[in-house]
Image (tube, grey):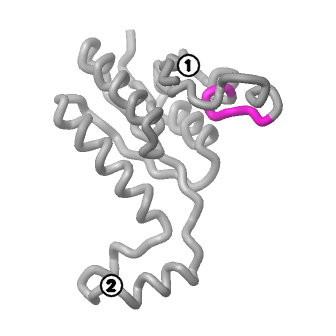
Amino acid sequence: MFGSIVVGTDGSDTAREAVKQAIMLASAVGARIELVSAYEPVSDARLREEAVQVPDDLQWMVNPREDVDGTLSEAAAEIREAGVDVGVFPRQGDPADAILDVAEERDADLIVVGNKGMTGAKRFLLGSVPNRISHHAPCSVLIIRTT
């Protein structure tokens, strides 16, 4: 039924719950999780400033996507700990686009997202990540109620 499950994370409580639910589902059906996190690049000025403060042997860690790499590493470790195979996809740009792109590229069977941001009138005006995904997904979408 589900061989590939895409789940996005930004490290928030809502995203952690979506990851947790994706792990339980993937474990139950033997699916692989494709873990996605979007980022905006860190400015060159900030990178230069941080590089000055870091020892030479750790310079490689100062990069435009350092924050997202930490978020993905933490979630991927939790997924592996549960015995689930995981792919990690840091993507520059909009979170909804990143999740949709990975779902398409990996021929996903399911996308799991939290519902944060889908309540009230704002969802019609601003559009939220789960709302956009639910309307444009190339596969089924499971929206986890977290609020």
What residue is disc 1 on? 139
**The N terminus lies in which quarter of the figure?**
top left
Q: Distance between the residues labelled 1 and 2?
A: 43 Å
Residue 58, x across and y down, in percent: 27, 80
Kind of residue at disc 2: Val
Considering only vertical position in the picture, is 126 above or below 5?
Answer: below
The answer to if 129 sits in the magenta stretch is yes
Most distant residue in the top direction: 1
Residue 9, x across and y down, in percent: 45, 40
Kind of residue at disc 1: Cys
Compare marks 1 and 2 and give the one earlier in the sequence: 2
What residue is disc 2 on? 54
- Residue in the picture at 30% in, 25% down: 23
Q: Nearer the viewer, mark 1 or mark 2?
A: 2
Considering only vertical position in the picture, is 126 above or below 2?
Answer: below
The answer to if 66 sits in the magenta stretch is no
Residue 123, x across and y down, in percent: 74, 28
Q: Nearer the viewer, residue 105 or 34?
A: 34
Q: Give the range drawn in magenta.
A: 126-131
> Quarter-wise, where is residue 86 in the image?
top left
- Residue in the picture at 41% in, 25% down: 5
Count of numbered labels shown in the rendering: 2
- Residue in the picture at 59% in, 43% down: 95
Neighbour class for label 2 at 10 Å: few (<14), some, many (≥20)? few
